[in-house]
Image: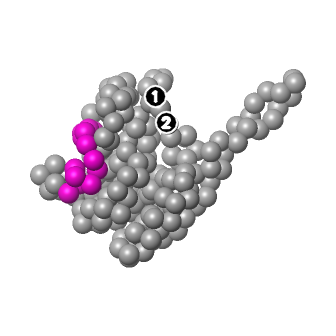
């Protein structure tokens, strides 16, 4: 099995991806936007849950775009388009992406504008992952203004680690999963 090529700050942990994607409610044939795609690991996991997804992977960081491209190749993702630039600009262009069914937002720059553009693209569900409480508050406020706020899930994961011949648990950074539904 292939390994995910990494970037700083990623990839998103598998447990976080599992809960986030379960909240999206992906369906076969969906158009899926992975905003702030990082390594593309969320997109790759999404293809295991729904067939025939069209993936729009968006990131402004060159390092992330290279990692996503390599990971899409390693995992044989053929239905993915990779976009370089600010998500609000890319989503604002009807020429690049005409509609979106579901969106995962891992990057939170311009979150209000990004959410607005996703709603304009008719996204029926949007999941935002955040680690900063200020981002959570901004996201909830923006979703409420758009009339799509559904819930927030606070998820903390711990992993086992050896200590003195026994086992302890080391916590990972907690993540807030903010869910919007049309």
State which quadrant residue 166 falls in: top right
Q: Which residue is mark 1?
A: 6
State which quadrant residue 145 falls in: bottom left
Q: Position of residue 60 (x, y in %)?
A: 31, 40
Q: In the shown orientation, is residue 33 left or right of residue 108?
A: left
* Nearer to the camera, 79 or 66: 66
Query: What's the magenta region?
Result: 79-92
The colour scheme used to paint the residues is one colour
Q: What residue sits 37% from the left and 45% below the top?
A: 36
Q: What residue sits 44% from the left and 57% below the top?
A: 127
* Nearer to the camera, 28 or 32: 32
Question: Seen from this angle, which residue lies furthest front?
Answer: 134
Q: Is residue 175 above or below residue 11?
A: below
Do the CB atoms of the residues marked 1 and 2 lie less than 8 Å apart?
yes
Q: Is residue 52 visible?
A: no
Q: What residue sits 47% from the left and 68% below the top?
A: 140
Dot 2: element: loop
Q: Position of residue 173 (x, y in %)?
A: 62, 45
Density class for disc 1 (Cα within 10 Å; few <14, some 14-19, many ≥20) is many
Question: Seen from this angle, which residue lies furthest left?
Answer: 95
Q: What residue sits 41% from the left and 52% below the top?
A: 108
Q: Is residue 155 visible?
A: yes
What is the distance, in whole Å, between disc 1 and disc 2 at their CAs? 6 Å
Q: Position of residue 73 (x, y in %)?
A: 32, 26
- The image quadrant where one finds the C terminus is bottom left
Q: Which residue is mark 2?
A: 10
Q: Position of residue 42 (x, y in %)?
A: 43, 42
Indicate whether residue 89 is drawn in magenta.
Answer: yes
Dot 1: element: loop
Q: In the shown orientation, is residue 55 left or right of residue 143?
A: left
């Amino acid at each position: 099995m292939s390994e995910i090529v990494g970037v700083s700050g990623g990839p998103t942990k598998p447990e976080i991806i599992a809960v986030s994607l379960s909240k999206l409610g992906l369906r076969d044939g969906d158009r899926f936007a992975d905003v702030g795609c990082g390594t593309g690991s969320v997109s790759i996991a999404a293809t295991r849950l729904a067939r025939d997804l069209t993936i729009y992977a968006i990131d402004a960081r060159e390092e992330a775009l290279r990692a996503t491209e390599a990971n899409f190749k390693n995992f044989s993702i053929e239905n993915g388009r990779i976009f370089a630039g600010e998500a609000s600009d890319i989503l604002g262009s009807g020429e690049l992406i005409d509609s979106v069914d579901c969106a995962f937002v891992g990057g939170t720059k311009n979150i209000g504008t990004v959410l607005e553009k996703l709603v304009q693209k008719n996204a029926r569900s949007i999941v935002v992952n955040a680690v900063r409480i200020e981002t959570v508050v901004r996201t909830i406020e923006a979703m409420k203004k758009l009339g799509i706020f559904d819930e927030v899930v606070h998820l903390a994961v711990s992993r086992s680690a050896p200590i003195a011949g026994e086992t302890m648990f080391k916590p990972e950074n907690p993540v807030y999963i903010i869910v919007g539904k049309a």
